[in-house]
Each structure stands twice: as C-alpha cells, then as structure tokens.
Amino acid sequence: MTARSIASLTLSFGLVSIPVKLYSATESASGVGFNLLTSEGGRVKQQYVSEATGEVVARVDMTKGYEFEKGQFVVFAPDELKALEEGASHVVEIVSFVPEKSVDPLYFDKAYFIAPDKRGGKPYSLLQQAMRKSKRCALAKWSYKGKTRIVQIRPAEDGMVFQQLLFADEVRALSDLNIEQVTVTDSELQLALQIIDQVAEDAYDATAFEDEEKKRILEAIDRKIAGKQIVSPEAPADESGGQVIDLMEALRASLSANKAKRAAPAKTSAPRKAAPAEVEVLATKPRRPAKRAAPKAEVKEAPPAKVRARK
C-alpha cells in the first residue's frame, strides 16, 4: 500500500529551503483487543456524565476549558481553540549540527520519515550526503499544533529520519534512583566479558524477534473459536530457592551452558516438551479467521503446529 504523507514541510538549511513531505515511520501493532460486553453478549459504549448533575452529556453540548484554579475554568470557543493552533508553521528551522551519537536515545519520541517534495530532490540529497560525510545530524525547531518541538534530522541509507525529541524536563534522571555502585573483581569482569562475546552479534536485526505473547494469545483465541477450553500455562519454577547465589559460580555455569548450546548438533535442538497445561494453550494451528477455524478432530492432527508454537 502506498504511504500517505501527513504534512508538507520546508526544511530551512541556511539560505536553502528544502520542500519535504512527512510520513509516519511506525505503525501500531498493539496487542490483542477485547471488547466490553454485557452478560447477554451485547456491546457496551462509553458515555460522558456531568459531575454536577449525574446526567449524560451529548458531545454536541460539550466545550473545552482550562482549569486555572481548583474548580474554576476559562472556557474556549471552537474558533478560539483554532486560533491557538494558528501559530504552527510549515517551516522547520535547522539551528545546529551535532555529532549523531551525541543525542541520547532516551530523548527519542515519535519517529517520522521525510522525503523530498517537488523540486526538492537535489537539496534533499545534498543535505543527506553532507550529514553522512560529516557524521553529524541536524537539530531543528518545529511548531506544530500549538507546541514547539525539537527534532533531530539524521541521514539514513535510503533517506532521512525526522526524529521528534523530548525536552529535558520530560526525561527523568537516572541519578534520582541513587543506585549503589558496587565494586566487582577483575575475574568477575573477565567472565562476564566472555559471556558477552559468546552471544555477541554485529548488528541489531529487528526481524529476529516477534511478539510471542501476542502470538500465544491469538493461538488461544483460535482454540476458543474451535470450542476448546483455555487453560493457563504453568508458571516457571523458581530455581533460586531463596538461596544466596555465588556470582563466580553463576558466571562459570553460564559460560559452560553457552558453550554446550553452541557445540550441540542442529538435530539435537528439539523443542522442550511442554507441560500438559501448556499444550492446551500452545499446540494450535496458525491464526485463521473464525469462519475457517479447524474442527476438533483436525486440531488433534496438527503435530507441526506444536513445533512452531515453541519456536
């Protein structure tokens, strides 16, 4: 499906203006949603109720106000609210260039993509390549919907990312937690580094991960549609037993376990046998629409699904 831009902007780069279009860089893939129903199975809906009278208030009778003192509001008409947003500008002014790694990801908010608009191809490519060459990113001001935002514009291989940043007062300080700094020995540090090296990767591959909880819930829903009972999986046993763990022994055991895992032949890496309670939830076929749910007899004859469910 063709991506749709959500805004037309102009990057101000010195005396150069770059017309661009703004696109959302992410899409919602939230968890499974459940509807609120009555005991008879009908949907329920939300209503707004007046705190003063307890009566239901229709949306057409609502207005917006700002509470300047406890219980006292100044009310704004729709045209006044619109006037508050008219300060927004389509011009995004670049104010500085900083090393790309100098922006802590902790300040990252919503991410967007920007692509060149009409007659913006060459200046867009110039800015992208200049930032890649200098290993710097741009910091810019963006006024949108009555609020000034700080954004980071950074080059990527196929274009540029328009990263909205949080302000300093929106990010908490880790130092506020007063975390105790405990001394570790050189031997402990060396063992920890060996464990890191054993499972180290050259880069982050987002496709290597999936939402396992969402997958498990969807599989359980398929079983429910097929008339099966949903059984809670058994909680993993607590192997610590409340005992004090020797850090060095735990590090050595982790190192040995990783070596054994890597040395094991591929054919021996069979999935762990699930407990009976887990089988009821996890041994299912892939997600299907309700109208095509498999009958009970077919659900039992699906051994491949058991293997896939445990991966």
Image (cartoon, helix red, strand yellow):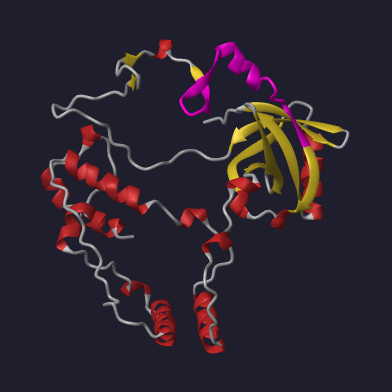
x, y (%) of residue 206? 51, 54
The quarter in which the C terminus is drawn is: bottom left
**In the image shown, does 21 or 289 lie closer to the viewer?**
21
Q: Answer left or right for 208 relative to 216.
A: right
Q: Answer left or right for 38 relative to 59.
A: left
Above or below: residue 194 compared with residue 155: below
x, y (%) of residue 96? 80, 45
Residue 286 appears in the picture as rendered:
no
Q: Quadrant of residue 145?
A: top right
Give the residue at x 58% y 50%: 171
Above or below: residue 62 compared with residue 306: above
**In the image shown, does 175 or 154 lie closer to the viewer?**
175
**In the image shown, does 49 or 145 lie closer to the viewer?**
49
Q: Which residues are magenta?
A: 65-93
Q: How many marks?
A: 0
In magenta segment, residue 191 = no
Residue 212 appears in the picture as rendered:
yes
Give the residue at x 22% y 42%: 222
Q: Quadrant of residue 118?
A: top right
**In the image shown, does 173 or 2 lie closer to the viewer?**
173
Above or below: residue 14 compared with residue 119: below
Give the residue at x 40% y 14%: 59
x, y (%) of residue 238? 26, 71
The residue at the far bottom in this view is: 187
In magenta segment, residue 88 = yes
Give the residue at x 73% y 37%: 141
x, y (%) of residue 13? 83, 37
The residue at the far left in this view is: 297
